[in-house]
Image (cartoon, rainbow, N blue to C red):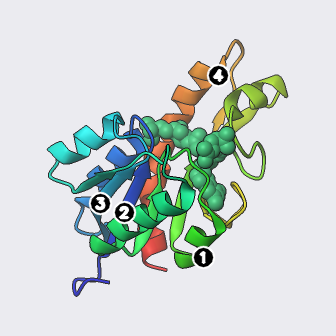
Amino acid sequence: MRPDGRAKVGILISGRGSNMQSLVAASRAADAGYDVALVASDKPEAAGLAWAAEQGIATFALSPKGIGKPAYEAAIDQALRSAGVEVIALAGYMRLLSGDFVARWRGRIVNIHPSLLPLYKGLDTHARAIAAGDAKAGCSVHIVTEELDDGEVLGQAEVPILPGDDATALAARVLVEEHRLYPQVLTEFVRR
Ligand SMILES: Nc1nc2c(c(=O)[nH]1)N[C@@H](CN(C=O)c1ccc(C(=O)N[C@@H](CCC(=O)O)C(=O)O)cc1)CN2
Ligand SMILES: NCC(=O)N[C@@H]1O[C@H](COP(=O)([O-])[O-])[C@@H](O)[C@H]1O
Protein backbone atom coordinates (compact mmCIF):
# COMPACT_ATOMS: atom_id res chain seq x y z
CA MET A 1 0.00 0.00 0.00
CA ARG A 2 1.42 3.37 -1.01
CA PRO A 3 1.86 6.12 1.63
CA ASP A 4 -1.26 7.81 0.23
CA GLY A 5 -3.17 4.58 0.93
CA ARG A 6 -3.81 3.87 -2.74
CA ALA A 7 -3.29 0.30 -3.94
CA LYS A 8 -1.27 -0.54 -7.04
CA VAL A 9 -3.38 -2.61 -9.44
CA GLY A 10 -2.23 -4.72 -12.39
CA ILE A 11 -4.85 -5.50 -15.05
CA LEU A 12 -4.68 -8.63 -17.24
CA ILE A 13 -6.50 -8.51 -20.58
CA SER A 14 -6.71 -10.69 -23.70
CA GLY A 15 -8.46 -8.36 -26.13
CA ARG A 16 -10.46 -5.15 -26.52
CA GLY A 17 -9.94 -4.01 -22.93
CA SER A 18 -13.10 -1.94 -22.39
CA ASN A 19 -13.33 -3.07 -18.76
CA MET A 20 -9.66 -2.17 -18.31
CA GLN A 21 -10.42 1.28 -19.72
CA SER A 22 -13.30 1.77 -17.24
CA LEU A 23 -11.00 0.76 -14.35
CA VAL A 24 -8.33 3.22 -15.54
CA ALA A 25 -10.85 6.04 -15.95
CA ALA A 26 -12.25 5.44 -12.45
CA SER A 27 -8.73 5.32 -10.96
CA ARG A 28 -8.33 8.99 -11.74
CA ALA A 29 -10.84 9.92 -9.00
CA ALA A 30 -9.26 11.09 -5.72
CA ASP A 31 -11.29 8.54 -3.77
CA ALA A 32 -10.69 5.58 -6.16
CA GLY A 33 -8.28 3.96 -3.69
CA TYR A 34 -6.12 2.52 -6.45
CA ASP A 35 -3.83 3.35 -9.36
CA VAL A 36 -3.19 1.17 -12.41
CA ALA A 37 0.51 0.31 -12.42
CA LEU A 38 0.55 -2.21 -15.29
CA VAL A 39 -1.63 -3.61 -18.08
CA ALA A 40 -0.48 -7.04 -19.23
CA SER A 41 -1.74 -9.48 -21.87
CA ASP A 42 -1.29 -12.98 -23.24
CA LYS A 43 -1.98 -11.45 -26.66
CA PRO A 44 0.68 -8.96 -27.88
CA GLU A 45 -1.85 -7.80 -30.49
CA ALA A 46 -4.55 -7.03 -27.91
CA ALA A 47 -6.17 -3.65 -28.75
CA GLY A 48 -6.28 -2.67 -25.09
CA LEU A 49 -2.47 -2.67 -24.82
CA ALA A 50 -2.09 0.14 -27.34
CA TRP A 51 -4.73 2.21 -25.53
CA ALA A 52 -3.02 1.73 -22.16
CA ALA A 53 0.37 2.73 -23.62
CA GLU A 54 -1.21 5.88 -25.05
CA GLN A 55 -2.38 6.70 -21.52
CA GLY A 56 1.21 6.43 -20.31
CA ILE A 57 0.52 3.17 -18.42
CA ALA A 58 3.26 0.52 -18.38
CA THR A 59 2.38 -2.53 -20.45
CA PHE A 60 3.66 -6.10 -20.75
CA ALA A 61 2.71 -8.65 -23.40
CA LEU A 62 3.76 -12.27 -23.79
CA SER A 63 2.13 -15.20 -25.60
CA PRO A 64 2.30 -18.53 -23.75
CA LYS A 65 2.55 -20.29 -27.12
CA GLY A 66 5.75 -22.31 -27.31
CA ILE A 67 7.00 -21.47 -23.80
CA GLY A 68 4.51 -23.41 -21.68
CA LYS A 69 2.31 -22.16 -18.83
CA PRO A 70 4.92 -22.27 -15.96
CA ALA A 71 7.45 -20.07 -17.82
CA TYR A 72 4.68 -17.83 -19.12
CA GLU A 73 3.16 -17.32 -15.67
CA ALA A 74 6.61 -16.74 -14.11
CA ALA A 75 7.20 -13.91 -16.61
CA ILE A 76 3.77 -12.34 -15.94
CA ASP A 77 4.38 -12.70 -12.19
CA GLN A 78 7.77 -10.98 -12.48
CA ALA A 79 6.33 -8.12 -14.55
CA LEU A 80 3.59 -7.56 -11.96
CA ARG A 81 6.01 -7.61 -9.04
CA SER A 82 8.49 -5.31 -10.80
CA ALA A 83 5.66 -2.81 -11.26
CA GLY A 84 4.90 -3.00 -7.52
CA VAL A 85 1.45 -4.49 -8.14
CA GLU A 86 -0.50 -5.48 -5.00
CA VAL A 87 -3.88 -6.46 -6.53
CA ILE A 88 -4.59 -8.12 -9.90
CA ALA A 89 -7.80 -7.40 -11.83
CA LEU A 90 -8.68 -9.82 -14.65
CA ALA A 91 -10.61 -7.97 -17.36
CA GLY A 92 -11.50 -10.16 -20.33
CA TYR A 93 -8.44 -12.32 -19.59
CA MET A 94 -9.12 -15.64 -21.26
CA ARG A 95 -6.46 -17.90 -19.79
CA LEU A 96 -6.89 -20.23 -16.87
CA LEU A 97 -4.46 -19.23 -14.08
CA SER A 98 -2.71 -22.19 -12.47
CA GLY A 99 -3.11 -23.12 -8.82
CA ASP A 100 0.51 -22.07 -8.22
CA PHE A 101 -0.05 -18.60 -9.63
CA VAL A 102 -3.29 -18.13 -7.70
CA ALA A 103 -1.57 -19.34 -4.51
CA ARG A 104 1.20 -16.74 -4.94
CA TRP A 105 -1.48 -14.01 -5.12
CA ARG A 106 -4.07 -15.61 -2.86
CA GLY A 107 -7.02 -13.36 -2.14
CA ARG A 108 -5.52 -10.54 -4.25
CA ILE A 109 -6.93 -11.44 -7.69
CA VAL A 110 -10.43 -10.40 -8.84
CA ASN A 111 -12.26 -11.08 -12.10
CA ILE A 112 -15.34 -9.86 -13.94
CA HIS A 113 -17.50 -12.63 -15.41
CA PRO A 114 -20.49 -12.02 -17.72
CA SER A 115 -23.08 -14.04 -15.83
CA LEU A 116 -24.94 -14.07 -12.51
CA LEU A 117 -22.61 -16.55 -10.79
CA PRO A 118 -22.90 -19.35 -9.82
CA LEU A 119 -24.97 -19.60 -13.01
CA TYR A 120 -23.09 -20.15 -16.28
CA LYS A 121 -19.47 -20.55 -15.33
CA GLY A 122 -17.12 -20.71 -18.32
CA LEU A 123 -17.83 -19.43 -21.81
CA ASP A 124 -20.87 -18.49 -23.97
CA THR A 125 -22.76 -17.24 -20.92
CA HIS A 126 -25.30 -15.04 -22.75
CA ALA A 127 -26.31 -17.70 -25.32
CA ARG A 128 -26.78 -20.17 -22.46
CA ALA A 129 -28.97 -17.79 -20.45
CA ILE A 130 -31.14 -17.09 -23.50
CA ALA A 131 -31.34 -20.80 -24.40
CA ALA A 132 -32.47 -21.55 -20.85
CA GLY A 133 -35.30 -19.04 -21.18
CA ASP A 134 -34.03 -16.92 -18.30
CA ALA A 135 -35.73 -13.57 -17.66
CA LYS A 136 -32.55 -11.87 -16.51
CA ALA A 137 -28.78 -12.01 -16.97
CA GLY A 138 -25.88 -9.96 -15.71
CA CYS A 139 -22.30 -9.89 -14.52
CA SER A 140 -20.34 -10.76 -11.40
CA VAL A 141 -17.07 -9.60 -9.87
CA HIS A 142 -15.50 -12.40 -7.85
CA ILE A 143 -12.29 -13.33 -6.08
CA VAL A 144 -10.23 -15.70 -8.25
CA THR A 145 -9.44 -19.18 -6.95
CA GLU A 146 -7.89 -22.19 -8.63
CA GLU A 147 -11.35 -23.28 -9.75
CA LEU A 148 -12.88 -21.48 -12.75
CA ASP A 149 -15.38 -18.72 -11.82
CA ASP A 150 -15.76 -20.19 -8.34
CA GLY A 151 -14.49 -17.64 -5.82
CA GLU A 152 -16.42 -15.35 -3.43
CA VAL A 153 -18.76 -13.04 -5.34
CA LEU A 154 -18.02 -9.44 -4.39
CA GLY A 155 -20.70 -7.74 -6.51
CA GLN A 156 -23.30 -8.38 -9.23
CA ALA A 157 -25.49 -6.39 -11.62
CA GLU A 158 -28.62 -7.65 -13.36
CA VAL A 159 -30.20 -6.77 -16.72
CA PRO A 160 -33.42 -8.04 -18.30
CA ILE A 161 -33.33 -10.50 -21.16
CA LEU A 162 -35.71 -9.00 -23.71
CA PRO A 163 -37.85 -10.76 -26.35
CA GLY A 164 -35.80 -11.28 -29.52
CA ASP A 165 -32.49 -10.84 -27.72
CA ASP A 166 -29.53 -12.66 -29.22
CA ALA A 167 -26.21 -13.15 -27.41
CA THR A 168 -24.72 -10.04 -29.05
CA ALA A 169 -27.55 -7.74 -27.96
CA LEU A 170 -27.52 -9.16 -24.43
CA ALA A 171 -23.71 -8.91 -24.18
CA ALA A 172 -23.89 -5.21 -25.08
CA ARG A 173 -26.53 -4.58 -22.38
CA VAL A 174 -24.48 -6.47 -19.78
CA LEU A 175 -21.23 -4.71 -20.77
CA VAL A 176 -22.71 -1.33 -19.77
CA GLU A 177 -23.28 -2.76 -16.29
CA GLU A 178 -19.79 -4.31 -16.22
CA HIS A 179 -18.21 -0.90 -16.79
CA ARG A 180 -20.22 0.55 -13.90
CA LEU A 181 -19.88 -2.38 -11.46
CA TYR A 182 -16.17 -3.31 -11.77
CA PRO A 183 -14.65 0.05 -10.71
CA GLN A 184 -17.13 0.32 -7.83
CA VAL A 185 -16.31 -3.17 -6.54
CA LEU A 186 -12.54 -2.75 -7.03
CA THR A 187 -12.58 0.45 -4.95
CA GLU A 188 -14.43 -1.39 -2.16
CA PHE A 189 -12.08 -4.40 -2.49
CA VAL A 190 -8.81 -2.49 -2.13
CA ARG A 191 -10.24 -0.89 1.02
CA ARG A 192 -11.12 -4.27 2.60
N1 LIG B 1 -7.78 -19.98 -11.89
C1 LIG B 1 -8.64 -19.17 -12.56
N2 LIG B 1 -8.25 -18.59 -13.71
C2 LIG B 1 -9.12 -17.75 -14.34
C3 LIG B 1 -10.42 -17.53 -13.84
C4 LIG B 1 -10.80 -18.15 -12.60
O1 LIG B 1 -11.94 -17.97 -12.09
N3 LIG B 1 -9.87 -18.97 -12.00
N4 LIG B 1 -11.32 -16.74 -14.54
C5 LIG B 1 -10.95 -16.59 -15.93
C6 LIG B 1 -11.84 -15.73 -16.73
N5 LIG B 1 -12.90 -16.51 -17.29
C7 LIG B 1 -14.16 -16.26 -16.85
O2 LIG B 1 -14.42 -15.23 -16.23
C8 LIG B 1 -12.62 -17.54 -18.26
C9 LIG B 1 -11.50 -17.50 -19.01
C10 LIG B 1 -11.23 -18.54 -19.91
C11 LIG B 1 -12.08 -19.56 -20.06
C12 LIG B 1 -11.77 -20.65 -21.03
O3 LIG B 1 -12.51 -21.58 -21.12
N6 LIG B 1 -10.64 -20.50 -21.75
C13 LIG B 1 -10.21 -21.43 -22.77
C14 LIG B 1 -8.72 -21.27 -22.90
C15 LIG B 1 -8.05 -21.51 -21.60
C16 LIG B 1 -6.53 -21.40 -21.73
O4 LIG B 1 -6.04 -21.50 -22.82
O5 LIG B 1 -5.92 -21.18 -20.67
C17 LIG B 1 -10.40 -22.86 -22.49
O6 LIG B 1 -10.22 -23.27 -21.36
O7 LIG B 1 -10.62 -23.50 -23.52
C18 LIG B 1 -13.23 -19.60 -19.31
C19 LIG B 1 -13.52 -18.58 -18.40
C20 LIG B 1 -9.53 -16.17 -16.12
N7 LIG B 1 -8.70 -17.15 -15.50
N1 LIG C 1 -14.87 -15.42 -18.92
C1 LIG C 1 -14.26 -14.19 -18.98
C2 LIG C 1 -15.11 -13.35 -19.89
O1 LIG C 1 -15.84 -13.87 -20.70
N2 LIG C 1 -14.99 -12.05 -19.69
C3 LIG C 1 -15.76 -11.13 -20.48
O2 LIG C 1 -15.04 -10.80 -21.67
C4 LIG C 1 -15.41 -9.46 -22.05
C5 LIG C 1 -14.13 -8.68 -22.23
O3 LIG C 1 -14.42 -7.42 -22.76
P1 LIG C 1 -13.33 -6.27 -22.68
O4 LIG C 1 -12.01 -6.85 -23.23
O5 LIG C 1 -13.88 -5.18 -23.54
O6 LIG C 1 -13.17 -5.87 -21.22
C6 LIG C 1 -16.27 -8.89 -20.93
O7 LIG C 1 -17.64 -8.98 -21.25
C7 LIG C 1 -15.97 -9.82 -19.76
O8 LIG C 1 -17.03 -9.99 -18.83
Q: Quadrant of the N terminus?
A: bottom left
Q: Are marks 1 and 2 in contact (CB under 8 Å)?
A: no
Q: Is residue 133 left or right of residue 116?
A: right
Check disc 2 and give the amino acid type. Answer: Gly
Q: Which residue is mark 1?
A: 103
Q: Is mark 2 within 8 Å of ligand 1?
A: no
The residues bearing labels 1 and 2 have C-alpha atoms spaced at a distance of: 17 Å
In terms of secondary structure, where does tag 3 sit? strand
Q: Is residue 49 visible?
A: yes
**Above/below status of 26 relative to 129:** below
Looking at the image, is mark 3 or mark 4 nearer the viewer? 3
Q: How many marks?
A: 4
Q: Residues within 10 Å of mark 4 (few under 14, many from 20)?
A: some
Looking at the image, is mark 1 or mark 2 nearer the viewer? 1
Q: Which residue is mark 2?
A: 10
Residue sitting farthest toward the front: 66
Looking at the image, which is closer to me, 49 or 21? Answer: 49
Q: x, y (%) of residue 144?
A: 61, 64
Q: Which residue is mark 3?
A: 38
Sequence-first disc among 3 and 1: 3
Q: Residue at x 22, y 83 (%)?
A: 4
Q: Are marks 3 and 2 in contact (CB under 8 Å)?
A: yes
Looking at the image, is mark 4 or mark 2 nearer the viewer? 2
Sequence-first disc among 3 and 2: 2
Q: Which residue is mark 4?
A: 167
In terms of secondary structure, where does tag 1 sit? helix
**Above/below status of 129 relative to 86:** above
Q: Is mark 4 within 8 Å of ligand 2?
A: no
Sequence-first disc among 3 and 4: 3
In terms of secondary structure, where does tag 4 sit? helix
Q: Residue at x 57, y 48 (%)?
A: 95
Q: Is residue 24 left or right of residue 55?
A: right
